[in-house]
Image (spheres, helix red, strand yellow):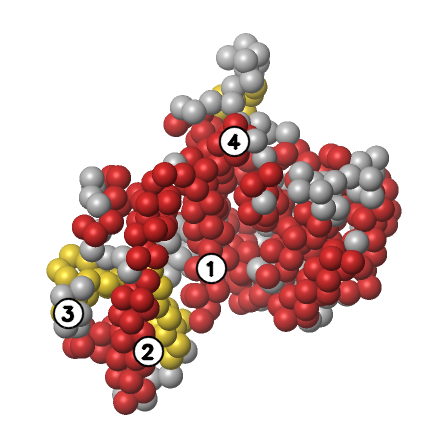
Amino acid sequence: MEAVMEKYARFEAVINENNPAADLTRIRAAFDFASAAHKNQRRKDGSPFVSHPLAAAEIVAEMGLDEEAIIAALLHDCIEDTGATHEEIAKRFGSSVAEIVEGVTKLTRVQYTSKEEEQMENLRKMLLAMAKDIRVIIIKMADRLHNMRTMEYQTPEKQAEKALETMEIYAPIAHRLGMQKIKWELEDRSIFYLDPIGYAEIKEGLRRVMSTNETFIDNIQNKINERLQENGIACDVYGRVKHIYSIYRKMYSQNKTLSEVLDLYAFRVIVGDIADCYNVLGNIHEMFRPIPGHFKDYIGTPKPNMYQSLHTTVIGSDGIPFEVQIRTWDMHHTAEYGIAAHWKYKEGISGRFADEEKFAWVRRLLESQQDSDAQDFFQDLKIDMFSDEVFVFTPRGDVINLPAGATPID
């Protein structure tokens, strides 16, 4: 248990960093409750089972979610795997926490059943429609992410099954909710099990040119930093090799080898305001040759999942192309954590979402929530994207969606 308590200390540090107003005493009570409920259970690696909900809760805390979400993450397996009841959790931690835990439990019961694209889309819709509170989906994402991080103790069959389910259901939902950081990791960890040879080839190819990559990235970062500092633009510049699944997808969709994939590199420039985003873009295009047709303005026209950035692909003096993404810090938080990031904006969140015409399902909910604070917002943020559809199970276990008003006879 000592190792678990070391993890708990790190967990508290994450909470203090991202949500200093959270009640650590109440959160500790939830951890103790979960520890007692799971006391005789072990994970496949032999560690105490409570290490899993603790890890999921830490992921939730990293996203800056509220106290109720953190507590619900700690308790998310209690109803499913222990003798704990909805009523007991509601009495100890409140009805809202109990409802979230119940929601996660219901999502756990939705099983992967078919490979067909239509079937996967029906399951994705059902997952969203079943989540009465957006925090249910976010906790389920954290649960799946930690499970994918600890899959080495599962059988090869279970690894492949979970990886395919993750790739076809969970990664697209993460994308739909704008949770790019989680989406990327889910994709990379899934392809590791779905195509271990392809994954290893890319990993090894990148390792062989690691020093070249690092030199290139450092050089471009320094050039951008120096130029923007000369022009009085405060910024943070980060460079990276694109994540493995992104490279994998390009290789196999375009029938290219790793050496033939041109835009392996992505740079991110984060600034204080929108005006500086466009100032940076002008400087980048003066420094490097832009590739025609490779500029996208997601600030003027945000993606439906709230993503905002300027994207441009340019060619350096050595002939190597690379992508540059330019955004503000607010945009960066949204790009990393999507809808989960927005609880931090409190009253400002309402107007921000209301302006996102393509995100109409959120805007509709916010029309009556203009004066809500963050906690009230999350309580009232219900997924109604597919409220005009009805989901039914066939005797074979498939999921079919029908129009609202449909009856079993249909």
Dot 2 surroundings within 10 Å: few (below 14), some, or many (20 or more)? some
Q: Identify which amino acid the numbered label 1 is placed on.
A: Glu
Identify residue for label 4: 156
Numbered disc in front, either 1 or 2: 1
Q: Identify which amino acid the numbered label 3 is placed on.
A: Asp
Q: Are marks 1 and 3 in contact (CB under 8 Å)?
A: no
Q: CA distance from mark 1 to mark 4?
A: 31 Å
Q: CA distance from mark 1 to mark 2?
A: 20 Å
| Residue 318 numbered tag | 3
Q: In the image, residue 294 lies at what x, y percent?
A: 19, 58
User: Earlier along the polypeptide chain: callout 3 or callout 4?
Assistant: 4
Identify residue for label 2: 276
Q: CA distance from mark 3 to mark 4?
A: 44 Å
User: Earlier along the polypeptide chain: callout 1 or callout 3?
Assistant: 3
Dot 1 surroundings within 10 Å: few (below 14), some, or many (20 or more)? some
Image vertical order of residue 283 relative to residue 34, above or below: below
Q: Identify which amino acid the numbered label 4 is placed on.
A: Pro
Identify residue for label 1: 336
User: Earlier along the polypeptide chain: callout 3 or callout 2?
Assistant: 2
Residue at point 34%, 51% (across, down): 204
